[in-house]
Amino acid sequence: MMLCWPLLVRVAPGSESRIDPPFLFLVLLPVVIAVVLAEMSEGGMDSRVLAVLGVLAAINALMRVLSAGTAGVELVFFLLILSGRVFGAGFGFVLGVTSLFASALMTAGVGPWLPFQMLCAAWVGMGAGLLPRRVLGREVRGRGEIAVLAVYGVVAAYLFGALMNLSSWPFLLGVAVPGHEGNLSFDPAAGVLENLRTFGVYTLITSTGSFDTGRAITTAVAVVVLGPAVLATLRRASRRAIVQQVQTAP
């Protein structure tokens, strides 16, 4: 609802009514953090897994600060995807939230866009954890797993860009793109399909061929080049945490 509510609101043509963004949605920032804390306290993550989470969140936040999305170069998604793959959907969701929140604090990037960034990044990590681990009774490992994760990284990169555009596009006025006739702004008097078509053109022209493609290429290349070594390291850390937990169990 945070992302798509403007598409569901209609204003009569010629009406002087206005649609203001429901800033009540900004309270979802502490709600999302509360969900993360609940996941940690309900036994889903022990102290060792939390330690791994803290390290990965710090690394991800630092990489995001260093890359800063220049020309779509994002170094945060490949580690988020690999971590979600190894530790599961819940871990991926929490890592996405904490990574974006930490990087926002480091770069003074706290603003109305932050809850959207946190949720979308959380979905990227969660989706990696939900990818099938077995196909036709065979476990997906090796080159096949890297290929699946690289393809997922490309899809997730484009979806992340589209969702972030959707979070701001309805509130941009007088959107005009060079080389394109007509206004690409959100029309509160238009129907859902018409606004979706306009949004599709807006996204295709403004980000799909530039920032989103750069993000997709960076993520796929990082998964292919660094994926095998990082997956092996994360799985080793995961096994050690589980073994130590069993050894210390009463």
Image (cartoon, rainbow, N blue to C red):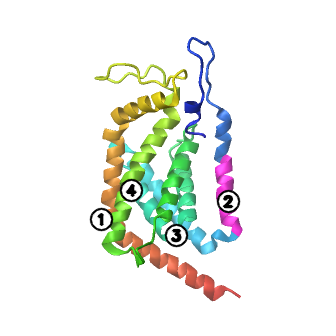
Q: What residue type is labelled 3?
A: Phe
Q: Which amino acid does label 2 sit on?
A: Leu
Picture residue at 55% right of the left edge, 23% below the top: 188
Of label 4 and label 1, which has the lower sequence position? 4
Asked if disc 4 and disc 3 are in contact, CB closer than 8 Å, the reply is no
Which residue, given by chain and number where applicable, does mark 1 sit on? Answer: 225
Q: Is residue 181 left or right of residue 109?
A: left
Element marked by disc 4: helix
Which residue, given by chain and number where applicable, does mark 4 sit on? Answer: 153
Q: What residue type is labelled 1?
A: Val
Q: Which amino acid does label 4 sit on?
A: Gly
Q: 87 or 182: which is nearer to us? A: 182
Q: Residue 37 carries which label?
A: 2
238 lies above or below 113: below
The span shown in magenta is 30-42
Q: 28 or 7: which is nearer to us? A: 7
Instruction: Give the CA separation, mark 1 to mark 2.
Output: 34 Å
